Structure formats: structure tokens, C-alpha cells
Image (cartoon, grey):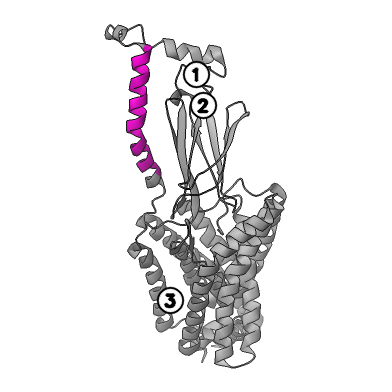
């Protein structure tokens, strides 16, 4: 009689089929499987900080508000991203910069440029602390005598340029959703359902034993 | 869109979201019948995965939400189902924040509950066409109301309501249309294959009575 109240195999199969389609669908779409989220990427090449804001998945965030703050909390600049979602800014102090992006629809993102990524020639925010690490590397090496500060600056700029694509790739990888994440989540839900069953059946057993006692 | 990150919403709104979500979740779990557990788990899993199905809209993209469908089938149990889905999305995919989970659940679950009420009303008509049309409307409204609630929670946190609402609602028009078709199709299938799956409160109570009779019967034997 009450059989029709239970989930029949047909019903379960159709539900599983829908779930399977949903799992498979993103694998066939052209863009990688990611949901809606704002991210920003920025690097410093010399004193020039350049970057962009983008949606995952999707394109660049155009006309988003960019706020750049220094380590001491003072505002260095407020900008807007251009049509390509890019922004650039020239640092005037060797201080850690926090770049905050607001797309205006509840999507916000931020990233940090460390003080060491900016050239040592810039005036430092707290002079005595920052001056020390710049001097140390030069004396011990014999060949270091040939490296003028100018050359060193050029090497650092070239290196930063070379490293940028690598950093971009790492940033994109962080957003990758792996199959094991999806399967893990589904496993958790099945586990929670099992737990709910266990708890409700324990409750049911208690009430049924109460019934037995009252009947006998 | 329904995944607001941490640090965007102000504290009073966050607290309100947490309190209402916990209350709704407790009530939903109280109403959870053992028979409805597989159904709840399947829909929670569907919700968890649906966010990965996205459609490009201009520079950004939108994803399926399915809160209308979940609300129709689960009623109050939709609140814990959505909370579990959102929690796992936040932990495993990095969609949305953790502290803001209450607000995000509220924004998705309230439209789901309204859809449930609307659908139950339409069932009184006994006309399959009206019922399926209402299911489609629920798919549309589920996303639309969520968009309005997201814009409201942003406005309450001191953002400009007009621009946020415009951005959020217009970006979601395509997904609203997709969910209209999807929800109508899913409910039409359920009505034909397994109409009992759509009976929530009444059906469960009937079933509970039945179980107790069985157990009493056993006790006699």
C-alpha cells in the first residue's frame, strides 16, 4: 500500500541521470568549469604596477573601481579599469600595496604587491627598515663588483617580465575546479543523508519500543 | 551572483542572515521525514553541481541556481538542502564566503519557500497545464527574487541599490528563462512519472501514520 510513497528505482534513476547531465555539461562547454567570481591579477615591473580584473569564468571586468592602498593605510590611487579590464599605476613609495577591485554588483577582489617587488630606488615608507636589505647582497661576491645598481635594476625588471606569465598561469590554476572536488562534495551529501537516516531511525526505534511497552 | 564573498556585506545584515538561516534550517530539519531524505540529498547534490553549469553573458557569466525547483519539491527542507550545497561550494570550489553563508542561504531559500507556496496553490486547480505553467513561473521567480534579494542585501550594506539591482537582475534574465524551461520540464516529468514525489506535508503525514500502524502491528505479533 505505502510502496508508492518510497523512491522507486525509476525515480532514483531519472534523478541520477539529471545529476549526471549536470556534472557532464561543464566538461563539454568551451570555457573551463568555473562559476561566477571576480579575481584580479597584478605584478610590478620596475615601479610600474600593472594588472587586470577578470571574472571566472568570463571575460575582463570593465569599468570596475580600483583602489590602491599603501601599507600605512593611506590611499595611493583610485582608478577605473579600461575596456580590457586593465589598470596600471606607478608606485611612488616602496611600500606594500593592496589593490582592491569593486565591480559594483557585489563582486569584489583584492591582491597584494609586496614591497620587495618594487625597486629599491623608490623612497621607502619606513626608511631605516628598508635600507638594510638593499645594501647586504653587494659586498660578499667578488663578481658583484661588476654589477652596478643600474644593471641590477635591469636584471630585476627583465626577471619580473619573464615571471609574469608564470604567475598568471598559477593564478588561473588556483581557480581550476577538479573532478575530485565535485566527487568529494557529492560524497559529503551522501554521507549526510546516511547520517540523517541513522538519526531518524534511532528516533523511530525509541518510539516503537515505547509503543511496545505501553501495549504490553 | 548568489555567492557573495566575505567582506562585502555589513555586520547587521550578516547577523540577520545567520539568525534567519539557522531558524529556517532548524524548522526544515524538524520537518524532514525519513522518506524524504533521498529526495533531499539528490536535490542538494543537484544544487551543489548546478553552479558549475554556466552561460556567458557579456563580460561575465551566470550559472544555474535551481532554487525554484528545489523549493517546489522540498518545501521547508529546501533550507538545509541549500545550506549544505552552499557550504560545500564555499569549501571545495571557493564560491562565496563562509561568514556570509547565512545571507547567501537566505537569498536563495526565501524565493524557494515562496515558490513552494505558489506551486501548492496551483495544485488545487487539478489542471496539469496550470500546474506546469506555475512550475515554469517558479523557475523564473526563484532566480528573479534571488537577484532582487542580493541587490537588497548589497543596498543594506551601503552599496548603491539601483546600479547593483540593474546589474544583477539584467545579467540574470537569460538564466531566468533557462530555469523557466528547465523547471517546467522537470515538474512535467515528475507529474507524469511520479506525482507522489511532489506531495510534501500531507503525503508525509499520511505516510507517518502508516508506519506507526505497521509498527503497532509488529508489536502485537
Q: Tell me the subunit letter for badge 1.
A: A
Label 1 neighbour load within 10 Å: few <14, some 14-19, many 20+: some
Residue neighbourhood size for the residue with mark 2, other residues' Cα within 10 Å, grouped as few (<14), some (14–19), many (≥20): many
Q: Is residue A150 magenta?
A: yes
Secondary structure of the residue carrying tag 2 is loop
What residue is pinned by disc 3?
Answer: A15
Q: Is residue A147 above or below residue A72?
A: above
* Quadrant of the rendered image containing residue A120: top left
Q: Could you tell whether A105 is left or right of B191 in the image?
A: right
Marks 3 and 2 in Cβ contact (< 8 Å):
no
**Residue in the foreground of this view, choosing between A37 and B170:** B170
**Would residue B101 be visible to someone looking at this image?**
yes
Asked if residue A167 is among those painted magenta in the image, a careful observer would answer yes
Measure how far apart labels 3 and 1 are at the Cα level. 62 Å
Q: Are marks 2 and 1 on the same chain?
A: yes
Q: From this viewpoint, is residue B28 visible?
A: no
Name the residue tied to disc 2: A91
Give the residue at the far left of this rendering. A143
Q: Where does label 1 land, which residue?
A: A122
For residue B110, which quarter of the picture?
bottom right
> Above or below — where is A144 with respect to A35?
above
* Magenta stretch bounds: A149-171
- Residue at the spot 54% in from the left edge and 85% down from the top edge: B132
Q: Residue A57 at x, y = what percent?
A: 43, 55
Q: Earlier in the sequence, mark 3 or mark 2?
A: 3
Distance Cα–Cα, label 2 vs label 1: 8 Å
The N terminus of chain B is located in which quarter? bottom right
Give the Cα separation between the discs numbered 3 and 2: 56 Å
Tell me whether the residue at label 2 lies in contact with that at label 1, contact meaning CB atoms closer than 8 angstroms. yes
Magenta highlight: main SS = helix
Amino acid at each position: 500500500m505505502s510502496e508508492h510513497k518510497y523512491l522507486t528505482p525509476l525515480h532514483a534513476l531519472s534523478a541520477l541521470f539529471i545529476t549526471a547531465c549536470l556534472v557532464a555539461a561543464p566538461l563539454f562547454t568551451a570555457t573551463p568549469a568555473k562559476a561566477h567570481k571576480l579575481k584580479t591579477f597584478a605584478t610590478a615591473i620596475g615601479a610600474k604596477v600593472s594588472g587586470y580584473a577578470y571574472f571566472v569564468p568570463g571575460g575582463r571586468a570593465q569599468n570596475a573601481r580600483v583602489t590602491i592602498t599603501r601599507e600605512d593605510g593611506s590611499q595611493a590611487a583610485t582608478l577605473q579599469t579600461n575596456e580590457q579590464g586593465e589598470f596600471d599605476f606607478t608606485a611612488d613609495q616602496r611600500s606594500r600595496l593592496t589593490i582592491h577591485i569593486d565591480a559594483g554588483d557585489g563582486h569584489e577582489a583584492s591582491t597584494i604587491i609586496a614591497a620587495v617587488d618594487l625597486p629599491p630606488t623608490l623612497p621607502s615608507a619606513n626608511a631605516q627598515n628598508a635600507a638594510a636589505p638593499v645594501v647586504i647582497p653587494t659586498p660578499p661576491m667578488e663578481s658583484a663588483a661588476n654589477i652596478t645598481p643600474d644593471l641590477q635594476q635591469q636584471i630585476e625588471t627583465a626577471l619580473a617580465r619573464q615571471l609574469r606569465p608564470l604567475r598568471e598561469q598559477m593564478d588561473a590554476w588556483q581557480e581550476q575546479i577538479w573532478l575530485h572536488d565535485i566527487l568529494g562534495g557529492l560524497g559529503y551529501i551522501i554521507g549526510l543523508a546516511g547520517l540523517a537516516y541513522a538519526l531518524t531511525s534511532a528516533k523511530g526505534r525509541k518510539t516503537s519500543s515505547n509503543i511496545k511497552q505501553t501495549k504490553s | 551572483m548568489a555567492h557573495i564573498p566575505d567582506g562585502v556585506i555589513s555586520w547587521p545584515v550578516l547577523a540577520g542572515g545567520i539568525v534567519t538561516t539557522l531558524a529556517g534550517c532548524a524548522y526544515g530539519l524538524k520537518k524532514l521525514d525519513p522518506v524524504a531524505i533521498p529526495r533531499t540529498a539528490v536535490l542538494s547534490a543537484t544544487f551543489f553541481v548546478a553552479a558549475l553549469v554556466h552561460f556567458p553573458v557579456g563580460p561575465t557569466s551566470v550559472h544555474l541556481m535551481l532554487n525554484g525547483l528545489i523549493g517546489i519539491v522540498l518545501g521547508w527542507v529546501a533550507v538545509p538542502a541549500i545550506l549544505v550545497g552552499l557550504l560545500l561550494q564555499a569549501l571545495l570550489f571557493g564560491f562565496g564566503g563562509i561568514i556570509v553563508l547565512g545571507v547567501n542561504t537566505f537569498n536563495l531559500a526565501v524565493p524557494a519557500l515562496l515558490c513552494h507556496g505558489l506551486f501548492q496553490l496551483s495544485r488545487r486547480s487539478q489542471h496539469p497545464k496550470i500546474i506546469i505553467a506555475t512550475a515554469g513561473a517558479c523557475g523564473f521567480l526563484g532566480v528573479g527574487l534571488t537577484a532582487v534579494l542580493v541587490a537588497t542585501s548589497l543596498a543594506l550594506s551601503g552599496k548603491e541599490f539601483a546600479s547593483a539591482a540593474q546589474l544583477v537582475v539584467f545579467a540574470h534574465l537569460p538564466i531566468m528563462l533557462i530555469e523557466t524551461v528547465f523547471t517546467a520540464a522537470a515538474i512535467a516529468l515528475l507529474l507524469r512519472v511520479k506525482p507522489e514525489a511532489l506531495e510534501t506535508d500531507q503525503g508525509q503525514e499520511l505516510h507517518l501514520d502508516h508506519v506507526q500502524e505497521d509498527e503497532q502491528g509488529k508489536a502485537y505479533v
